[in-house]
């Protein structure tokens, strides 16, 4: 089916004379997506400028998808979605969101997915990175720092050699602008939005650039926009210490089950003794041996207290001569995703230090302050060697747009403190915090106490009168 948008009002599209007007008038050719996708999921391509400072210049194709509202009479508009990352493709996200959204919400919205620029089917980039170059965190040691510097420089050099003509334009600000072109091409005056993780930052940037076009905005597991991006990586360490302390108390209360220590201090000592022993003799597991740094690098596990206790107990037993510890699932990270991550992290902001010694000093300082993970977010990154500074400064998010922020109390990747930063930046927002909630991502197939508030807001546009704390 072809949709020709020739009768858009200037408010729906762009002001008369705006060089972006021609993008609002493009024809979208909707077709079924891949044969393996549900028949109701339609896909199309939207042309957007590569460089919004030169709208008449080079263009790229943005891949978008759609599940139509189930009741045209009740249709409110479109609900754009983003699964996070950065670097995560989102074309199938409307299908993945379908079980989460109740019937009254599905009746009201066309759910829209898209692969952000540089990702998936939207002019993807690849830097041809080696396996060890696809990891985002590396422990610091004086003995390996030169290798760390060489690896970070190699990633930057490879990305610029492979995609230097587009890297300066793969930014969150430009993705937000792409969202507004999608809005106009769909013939909508405003858009609603549901973003997870990095998608919360993208949604917040959209509200800053286009406040009058922002409708119902849900931000699940939020980043603090003031921290983008190096301080976001460093922000994981203090949250990890809080989660670790909570875990030691939980495990101590269950010493009869896990045998890790009868007090929180004992459990803490058991863990650090295990790390020290693993540095001398790596602990065997079903998918390879772990040294102490590798065990520390699993700090995200401590927000899930029961699973973490089983993991550490298994490692302790293996270190004492027992059977190899169970394998820990490792998510595969594609070259495209890692390449897009560094394009965005390095291209969004001009605040990355250029001196490798600054990273060394910060890693030593942060490790001393936060022993579990302090150095992992402070060690040197490819942005130190990015060929050019960001085209634009980082977006300062500071507005009155209404939004609903949903957050687990114990989230390893977007800690509660970061969500509170998002709440401060969006003055018109409200936050629902799930007390005791564990893990990254609140809204999903497993019901939580926040679901009713989220779906009421999407359905009616009414935010709670004040912030809410609930417990599952």
Image (tube, grey):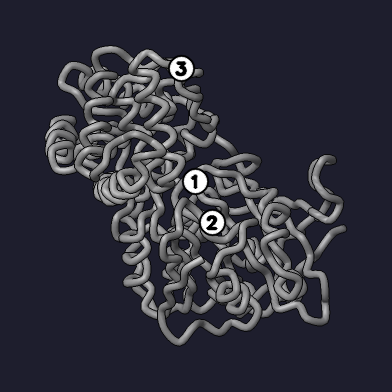
| Closer to the camera in the image, 390 or 23 | 390
Q: Are marks 2 and 3 in contact (CB under 8 Å)?
A: no
Task: Provide residue 411's location: percent of width, then percent of height.
Answer: 41, 53
- CA separation in Å, label 2 and label 3: 58 Å
Pick whichever, 249 or 240, lies toward us.
249
Task: Describe the element under mark 2 as helix, strand or loop.
Answer: loop
Which residue does the numbered mark 2 point to in the structure image? 55
Residue picked out by circle 1 = 85
Q: CA distance from mark 1 to mark 2?
A: 27 Å
Query: Between tags 1 and 2, which lies in front?
Result: 1
Position of 42 relative to 110 (above/below): above
Q: Are marks 1 and 3 in contact (CB under 8 Å)?
A: no
Across and down, in percent, residue 309 comes to 40, 38
Judged left or right of residue 402, residue 386 is left
Q: Give residue 7's position: percent from left, percent from top.
A: 75, 76
Q: Nearer the viewer, residue 28 or 297?
A: 297
Would residue 406 be found to the left or right of residue 79 on screen?
Answer: left
């Amino acid at each position: 089916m072809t949709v020709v948008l020739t009768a858009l009002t200037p408010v729906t599209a762009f002001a008369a004379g705006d060089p972006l007007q021609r993008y609002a008038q493009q024809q979208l050719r909707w077709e079924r997506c891949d044969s393996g996708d549900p028949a109701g999921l339609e896909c199309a391509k939207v042309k957007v400028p590569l460089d919004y400072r030169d709208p008449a210049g080079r263009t790229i194709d943005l891949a978008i998808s759609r599940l139509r509202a189930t009741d045209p009479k009740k249709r409110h508009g479109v609900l754009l979605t983003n699964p996070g990352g950065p670097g995560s493709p989102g074309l199938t996200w409307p299908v993945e969101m379908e079980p989460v959204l109740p019937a009254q919400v599905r009746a009201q919205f066309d759910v829209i997915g898209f692969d952000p620029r540089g990702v998936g089917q939207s002019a993807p980039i690849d830097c041809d990175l080696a396996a060890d170059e696809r990891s985002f965190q590396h422990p610091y040691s004086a003995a390996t720092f030169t290798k760390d510097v060489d690896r970070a420089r190699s990633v930057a050099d490879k990305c610029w050699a492979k995609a230097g003509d587009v890297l300066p334009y793969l930014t969150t600000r430009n993705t937000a602008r792409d969202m507004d072109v999608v809005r106009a091409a769909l013939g909508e005056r405003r858009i609603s939005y549901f973003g997870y993780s990095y998608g919360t930052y993208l949604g917040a940037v959209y509200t800053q650039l286009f406040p009058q076009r922002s409708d119902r905005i849900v931000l699940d597991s939020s980043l603090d926009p003031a921290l983008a991006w190096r301080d976001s990586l460093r922000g994981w360490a203090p949250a990890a210490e809080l989660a670790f302390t909570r875990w030691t108390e939980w495990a101590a209360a269950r010493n009869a089950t896990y045998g890790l220590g009868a007090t929180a201090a004992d459990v803490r000592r058991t863990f650090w003794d295990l790390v020290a022993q693993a540095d001398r003799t790596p602990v065997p597991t079903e998918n390879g041996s772990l040294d102490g740094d590798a065990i520390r690098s699993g700090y995200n596990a401590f927000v899930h207290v029961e699973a973490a206790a089983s993991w550490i107990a298994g490692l302790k037993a293996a270190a004492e001569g027992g059977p190899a510890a169970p394998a820990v699932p490792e998510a595969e990270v594609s070259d495209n995703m890692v390449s897009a991550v560094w394009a965005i992290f390095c291209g969004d902001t001009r605040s990355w230090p250029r001196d490798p010694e600054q990273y060394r000093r910060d890693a030593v300082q942060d490790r001393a302050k936060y022993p579990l993970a302090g150095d992992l977010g402070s060690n040197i990154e490819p942005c130190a060697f990015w060929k050019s500074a960001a085209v634009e400064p980082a977006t300062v998010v500071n507005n009155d747009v209404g939004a609903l922020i949903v957050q687990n109390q114990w989230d390893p990747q977007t800690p509660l403190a970061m969500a509170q930063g998002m709440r401060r930046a969006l003055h018109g927002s409200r936050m629902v915090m799930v007390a005791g909630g564990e893990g990254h991502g609140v809204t999903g197939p497993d019901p939580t106490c926040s679901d009713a508030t989220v779906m009421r807001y999407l359905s009616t546009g009414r935010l709670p009168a004040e912030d809410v704390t609930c417990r599952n």
